[in-house]
Image: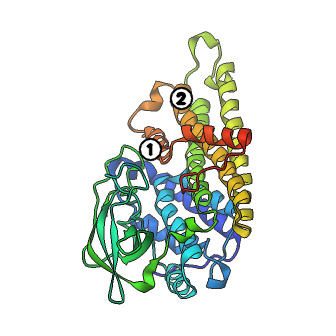
Amino acid sequence: MSAHIIKTEQEAVDAARALATRFRETAGERDRDRRLPWAELDESLATGLWGITIPREYGGPFVRQRIVAEVFKALASGDSSLAQIPQNHIEIIDLIRQTGSDAQKRLIFGRVLAGARLGNAFSEYKGKNVEDFQTRIRRQGDGYVVNGEKFYATGALYAHLVPIIAISEDDGKVYAAIAERDAPGLSVVDNWDGFGQRTTASGTVKIENVFVHADYVLPAHIAYEHQSAIGPQSQVLHAAIDLGIAETAIEKTIDLVRNHARPWIDANQEHAWEDPYTIAAIGDLKLRFNAADAVLTEAADVVDETTATPNLENIARAKIAVAEAKVLSTEIAILATNKLFELGGTRSTLAKHNLDRLWRDARTHTLHDPVRWKYSIIGDYYLTGTQPPLHSWI
């Protein structure tokens, strides 16, 4: 299929908000029935949103990170699964931008702008930690052969191209091999059964002697050997998705309180929205959401500054700024999806409303990287000047 090429930042935000409005109407049905969103992804792709971070010299608009955050927040407010799927696509675009040759950028970015979706075969289930990769790549002829198995492969099922992270048998370094979705030996198993983000199809990718031409193999290790903002750039997207879930949860809570919930007997009020404790709770939710949103916007700007001038000082600033946003976005996502039921009352738990999907999505997505570590990393930075880790999870 073909994709529109977005020209302005406002066009990107408007497109995302329009999609969110439509996706929100059927998000509950997709979650309940686990109906995979093929049509919705095609609609999203056609808008051009999947190409908004491609550099201008390669035909894209290369919007600011605050716009990327606004786009993903909007998409997640409609359906967090439909924000999570392109999240990995955006991450691999950044990896290509930082590690690909000019020819590779023209080739792959050209395909993306023409309507190709990039999937994800990064994480593995069996390693002792998230960077313990067992997948291997070796040189063969005019390309490479890859073998291994991946899990949490969000987007791979829906992709046209599947980026595979692997360790080279030749030099022991990390490479990204971007395989065709229908390449011989590549199979995607739809075995994701997490209780949240049920339609991301974040299952297994099996890689058995998959051949990838050298034009599609990137020296991913360069992003870590050289100074870059690849970690915090990724984290901006995750924080934005959390905020999108929180935003919808707060909107649903206000609707329930104003139009459906009954006042508690001791409140001596005619309506639930007149309960002073409920009023205070809504105020607390909005305050925390607005604070997290503002911190994320500021952090996104720091990431842009770091992308322009990637030195260790700026990278540390970006990592800490985004870590602060990630802590706040996680907290408000969990709090808002909990308060939805506390303030909405027992009737809010009825299956016909399927509001528990918001809590399930928030709880699942916020597990991506443990925020309990971020408090210490943030504190150590301010207290002792210790630089944050250079990996992608902060």
Q: How far apart are marks 2 and 1 (CA)?
A: 22 Å
User: Which one is in front, 244 or 134?
Assistant: 134
Q: Mark 1 points at which residue?
A: 364
Categorize mark 1 by other alpha carbons within 10 Å: few (<14), some (14-19), many (20+): some
Closer to us: 343 or 317: 317
Mark count: 2
**Residue 115 in picture, x, y percent from top left:** 48, 79
In this view, which residue lies farthest toward the front? 171
**What residue is shown at x 41% (from left), y 45% (from top)?**
196
Quarter holding the N terminus is bottom left
Q: In this view, does 191 lie to the left or right of 51?
A: left
Q: Is residue 372 above or below residue 43?
A: above
Q: Name the residue under label 2.
A: 344
Q: For the point 50% across and 46% down, which residue is it? A: 369
Give the residue at x 55% y 75%.
99
Which residue: 51% across, 69% down? 221
Q: Residue 380's x, y, as percent?
A: 67, 40
41 over 247 or under it: above or below: below
Looking at the picture, tell me which residue is in the foreground, 204 or 271: 204
Q: Which of marks 2 and 1 is nearer the N terminus?
A: 2
Q: Quadrant of residue 349?
A: top left
Q: Which mark is residue 298?
A: none
What's the residue type where badge 1 is placed?
Answer: Thr
